[in-house]
Amino acid sequence: MKSSSLGYPRIGEDREWKRTLEAYWSGKIDEAEFTAQLKAIRLGNLQKQKQRGIDIIPVNDFTFYDQMLDMSVMFGLVPDRYSAYEGGSVPLSVYYSMARGNNDEVASEMTKWFNTNYHYIVPELKVPQLTLTENKPLAAYREAKEMLGIETKPVLIGPYTFISLSKGFNKQEIPGIILSLLPLYTQILQELEQEGVKWVQMDEPSLVSSISKDDMQTVTYLYEKLNEAAPNLNIMLQTYFDSVEHYQEVIELKVQGIGLDFAHDKGRNLSNLEAFGFPKDKVLAAGVIDGKNIWLSDLSKKIQLIETLKKKVSEDQIWLQPSCSLLHVPVTVHNETALSKEVKDALAFADEKLEEITLLVKGNNQGFEAIEEKVAANKFTIQTLASSNARNHGSVQSNVEKVKTRTAGRQLPFKERYQKQQGFFKLPFLPSTTIGSFPQTFEVKQARGKFKRGEWTAQQYETFVNEEIGRWIEIQEEIGLDVLVHGEFERTDMVEYFGHKLGGFVFLEKGWVQSYGSRCVKPPVIYGDIHFIEPMTVRESVFAQSLTKKTVKGMLTGPVTILNWSFVRDDISRENVCYQLALALEKEVIALESAGIKMIQVDEPALREGLPLKKSDRDEYLNWAVNSFLISTSSVEDTTQIHTHMCYCDFNSFMDVISSLDADVISIETSRSHGELASAFEAKTYEKGIGLGVYDIHSPRVPAVEEMVDMIERGIKVLDKDQFWINPDCGLKTRGLPETVASLKNMVEAAKIVRENLLAKPTGK
Ligand code: GLN
Ligand code: ZN
């Protein structure tokens, strides 16, 4: 049995990768310095893996920005709008224009990598352009060999996944695209073969999504051709994030190894392996250690799993590895100095996961007695955390069991309570509002820094926040918005803020993971039972409400979003953790209502991204996700109006789910695809309150009044004017003050014009 890995975090223990990129972008270092620094990080990463005893070390998992973008530039796929590109190998300046845009040319689209929080740059396919500009995997292989004497396994994205994640073509064009991509892949593999490379890892995570039989045939064809082209090169066809959709076909592919995820497969890969076996002539790269979460593995369970695998696959044909690239976890637990021993001992980031792998391989190869002590210590750590107070907090778990049997829901059906609410709030039709946050200016960030460093007392900080709230209440009144917000100045982040106030969370010091480009995030860690300690948002909302006669909308983050944007304990189901969050947030909603806040927005921007990769798993997720939202929001009086917000465009396939949240009003991010959205409503009917964002907050541009008039008029052609709300498409915290005020003024003016037009000659639905 051998140890292997699929990819290592590129950012460095102290985010040195990020700093190098940003230093280069700002002109602080030149290209030579930049490439030298990145080379040092890259080689350092390889050495760390070597020192940990990994037999099969990946290369070409490193990148200057994103691995999908690397594939695109390797194939010469530079969209025409980047005028500096003249063909041939792609200069760094063009590479970064594609990634980040420049003054004149917009960046390529970025989107989420499967069900992770990593974002890749979407390739824009243009068939006549395809040409191999460089062989990056080969260069990475050579570098490791020459500099460190390590024989490595180059990694690249396989053709099926590459095409499935690209855009710019119709379905009918796919055969043509495949035919023009194949020679490029062939050339890469042949050059690797000539160099004497033993194994190449071709990542095909798309094979775990709900792919059709036809597509599976295409995959079979592709790998037959690639194998024919480089018969002496071993291909490890690597899947991850779930079980493969067509197990029997996948294991018969013309490749020398298959990589399967045994951590996030819901047991399906294993039961398929037990039912259908595994070919004798192939290597099984067994993803036994969870590569996406941060917890120590239960070694006894892993040993059992290894024994089960060995019943079907001979042990010299097994590689033990993480379930996916370690890109999705922080680098090492060693740098965490503030955690309790109980928690710290129970964590495993990239380096510790590799140690688990080599330990298990050693156990297997020398007999598990050889690692007995470590296994016993591991059991002790896991049991200690399991029996800790944090994981056995009062009645939290029994309340979750109870709530699962409760059908959560408002007392009155939507139409009746909306009518009551309209009487209560007395808003004009087409009421205007915002999504919650206002600009987090330099001063706001500076104040938070002072408070964090202890230079300011809590009192001083609170005074500052109050002043900001007061200033913005005045601004909003002057703009003429109908429903006001307090502005979220007290929050750095919409999840972290609640994590700090709820019981059951801890925070990491260096627990960064790459989100996109140089941007890294440090997700909060849910390690214990979640419980409500004290009101979290009431003070700010009540203060804001005390300053105005207009309605102030309360603002909190929903249970599903907090779940999806955190690292979550893995000893109980995500469903149960979500219910714990839901019960805690229900208390917050009730606290707001009793404090006089009668309009409450519960944001769920991450609800959709938690969707499982397989269609067949989606209902189960949506069932508990929607129910969690309902639990948090349904215990209010009929006249209390619940709002929600999602950043989301492709509304078509999701309207039923949104409707089942039963929020009185939803605001969604649609200003960039307004036309498509309107057609969704033509086909179906949505009866609840809805604000289709009338302008895009992601750009500093101030939209003209007429543009928004047009947008609103298109909206009320398909939606009732009494259900339509006017708002920007997301929070304004990343914007500056001048453009925010100017845009909102235009928005309010647009609403006024449409109202007047409607009164003059009522059209609409
Ligand atoms: N209320 C949040 C804000 O305005 C919503 C943010 C989001 O949708 N991501 O910032
Ligand atoms: Zn949003």
Image (cartoon, helix red, strand yellow):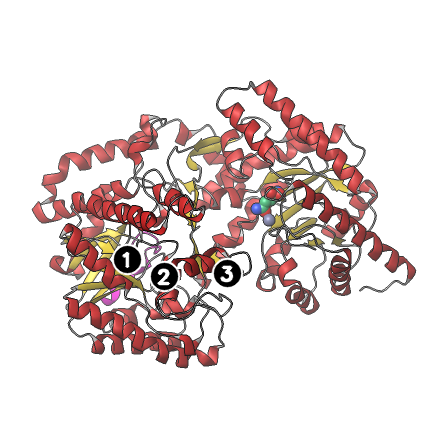
Q: How many residues crowd mark 2 within 10 Å: few (<14), some (14–19), many (20+)?
A: many
Which residue is at a point 52% across and 29% down the rendered structure image? 501
Asked which quadrant contains residue 132, the reply is bottom left
- First in sequence, mark 2 or 1: give its number: 1
Residue type, label 1? Asn
For ligand 1, tell me if the residue under mark 1 lies within 8 Å. no
Q: How many residues crowd mark 1 within 10 Å: few (<14), some (14–19), many (20+)?
A: many
Q: Which residue is mark 3?
A: 109
Q: Is residue 32 magenta?
A: no
* Picture disc at residue 60: 1
Viewer-proximal residue among 155 and 343: 155
Which residue is at a point 24% across and 72% down the rendered structure image? 252
Viewer-proximal residue among 88 and 110: 88
Q: Is residue 269 magenta?
A: yes
Q: Is residue 88 visible?
A: yes
145 on left or right of 251:
left
Residue type, label 2? Asp
Q: Is residue 407 visible?
A: no
Q: Which residue is mark 2?
A: 70
Asked which quadrant contains residue 140, the reply is bottom left
- Residue 721 placed where, x, y %? 80, 57
Residue type, label 3? Glu
| Secondary element at image label 2 | helix
Report the span colored magenta. 259-279
Q: Are marks 2 and 1 in contact (CB under 8 Å)?
A: yes
- First in sequence, mark 2 or 3: give its number: 2
For ligand 1, tell me if the residue under mark 2 lies within 8 Å. no
